[in-house]
């Protein structure tokens, strides 16, 4: 004949359950906190950032680069720095819920213009040096390699654009095969998730190729 479980027995079983599962709970909570507030990793499916980032790359994202993130949100507690020209950032643009990765080209106060597909910043042309099938673009204060893939053709941005406060102009390093600010507009600084710190892993043979061209 079964006996009813007394209150002390229930309390004892509860304590045993908590002891057994507390470590796992704290581990999961710690991992979620780490990924939402400190650092995360992102898988890259597209070619828009070649030759710096290849499809299949797993990127290490520093979420503390521009200020401490509020855990479990897309917001920051406060900002102690802002993205600079040449930074590779991840962000959630207004037109999609997908997290994107692009390079910062224009920051607040910059004047951007495309003349015959050549980029000008603050009235000066961005110097481009040819390197095999890649170009080295010399931004003010930063340089990086670009791909010469030409599958997109003409630049959709026309005229002069002044970057307002709180906004960023971003582009892919695969300049002619990237859907970026030239098409859907500026990125709000509040939409920035973090800065790409490193390429953590890629199981394809392109992982080693990157070391000849990467400019993170």
Image (tube, rainbow, N blue to C red):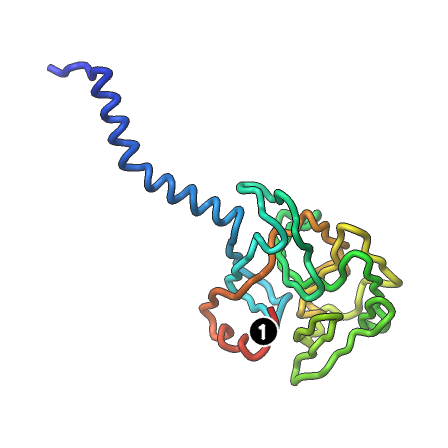
Q: Seen in the image, is 3 located left or right of residue 170?
A: left
**In this view, 52 is above or below 70:** below
Please provide percent x and percent y for residue 159: 89, 63
Q: Seen in the image, is 171 located left or right of residue 160?
A: left
Please provide percent x and percent y for residue 92: 64, 50
Q: Seen in the image, is 67 located left or right of residue 18?
A: right
| Residue designated by label 1 | 214
Q: At 52% across and 65% down in the image, what residue appears?
A: 57
Can residue 75 be seen at all in this image of the molecule? no
Please provide percent x and percent y for residue 59: 53, 61
* In the foreground, 205 or 194: 194
**In this view, 40 is above or below 172:** above
Can residue 108 be seen at all in this image of the molecule? yes
Q: At 50% across and 62% down in the image, what residue appears?
A: 58
- Residue furthest to the front in view is 80
Q: At 85% across and 59% down in the image, what residue appears?
A: 161
């Amino acid at each position: 004949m079964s006996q009813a479980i007394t209150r002390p027995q229930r309390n004892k079983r509860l304590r045993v359950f908590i002891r057994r599962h507390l470590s796992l709970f704290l581990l999961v909570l710690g991992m979620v906190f780490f990924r939402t507030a400190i650092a995360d990793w992102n898988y890259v499916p597209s070619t828009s950032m070649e030759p710096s980032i290849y499809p299949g790359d797993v990127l290490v994202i520093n979420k503390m680069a521009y200020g401490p993130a509020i855990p479990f949100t897309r917001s920051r507690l406060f900002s102690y720095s802002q993205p600079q020209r040449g930074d590779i950032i991840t962000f959630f643009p207004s037109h999609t819920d997908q997290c994107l990765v692009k390079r910062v080209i224009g920051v607040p106060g910059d004047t951007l213009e495309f003349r015959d597909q050549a980029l000008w910043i603050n009235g000066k042309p961005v110097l481009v040096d040819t390197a095999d099938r890649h170009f080295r673009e010399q931004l003010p204060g930063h340089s990086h390699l670009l791909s010469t893939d030409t599958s997109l053709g003409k630049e959709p941005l026309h005229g002069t654009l002044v970057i307002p406060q709180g906004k960023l102009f971003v582009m892919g390093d695969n300049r002619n095969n990237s859907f970026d600010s030239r098409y859907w507009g500026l990125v709000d600084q509040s939409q920035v998730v973090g800065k790409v710190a490193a390429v953590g892993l890629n199981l394809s043979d392109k992982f080693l190729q990157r070391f000849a061209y990467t400019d993170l």
